């Protein structure tokens, strides 16, 4: 009977773990080094567009309709719009 000795396969788990840790550290350092530096504070929406108090406005429709500029406009369509008949009266009826 022969005794056979098998070599155990070496796992490079420690090496892969070290490489992964080094890549993570290098990525973190790169991110820290290349991240943008904010010199001025970004304005908020209230600073850009201050909220105006809401004042109810009344629209004078008669004044608009009697305006000379409004009366110079031309009407290119008639209202209400007339739609042409679409499709067939009975879509299930054969041709």
Image (cartoon, rainbow, N blue to C red):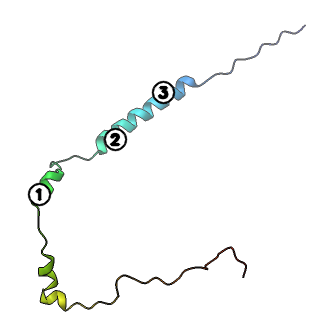
Could you classify mark 2 by the number of other residues whose Cα lies within 10 Å: few (under 14), some (14-19), or many (20 or more)?
A: few
Could you classify mark 3 by the number of other residues whose Cα lies within 10 Å: few (under 14), some (14-19), or many (20 or more)?
A: few
1 vs 3, front mark: 1
Between disc 1 and disc 2, whose residue precedes?
2
Between disc 1 and disc 3, whose residue precedes?
3
Could you classify mark 1 by the number of other residues whose Cα lies within 10 Å: few (under 14), some (14-19), or many (20 or more)?
A: few
Q: Position of residue 27 (x, y in %)?
A: 39, 38
The label number, if any, that marks residue 31 in the structure image:
2
The label number, if any, that marks residue 18 in the structure image:
3
| Quarter that holds the C terminus | bottom right
Q: Which residue is mark 1?
A: 54
Q: Residue at x 36, y 81 (%)?
A: 80
Q: Residue at x 76, y 16 (%)?
A: 6
1 vs 2, front mark: 1
Q: For numbered disc 2, what is the local secondary structure?
A: helix
Left or right: residue 13 versus residue 70 is: right
Q: Position of residue 58 (x, y in %)?
A: 11, 68
Q: For numbered disc 3, what is the local secondary structure?
A: helix
Q: Residue at x 22, y 90 (%)?
A: 73
Q: Nearer the viewer, residue 83 or 14?
A: 83
């Amino acid at each position: 009977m022969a005794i056979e000795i098998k070599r155990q396969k070496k796992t490079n788990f420690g090496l892969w773990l070290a490489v992964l840790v080094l890549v993570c550290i290098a990525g973190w350092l790169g991110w820290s080094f290349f991240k943008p530096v904010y010199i001025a504070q970004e304005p908020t929406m209230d600073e850009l567009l201050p909220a105006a108090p809401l004042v109810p406005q009344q629209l004078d429709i008669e004044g608009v309709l009697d305006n000379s500029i409004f009366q110079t406009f031309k009407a290119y369509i008639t209202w209400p719009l007339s739609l042409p008949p679409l499709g067939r009266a009975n879509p299930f009826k054969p041709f």
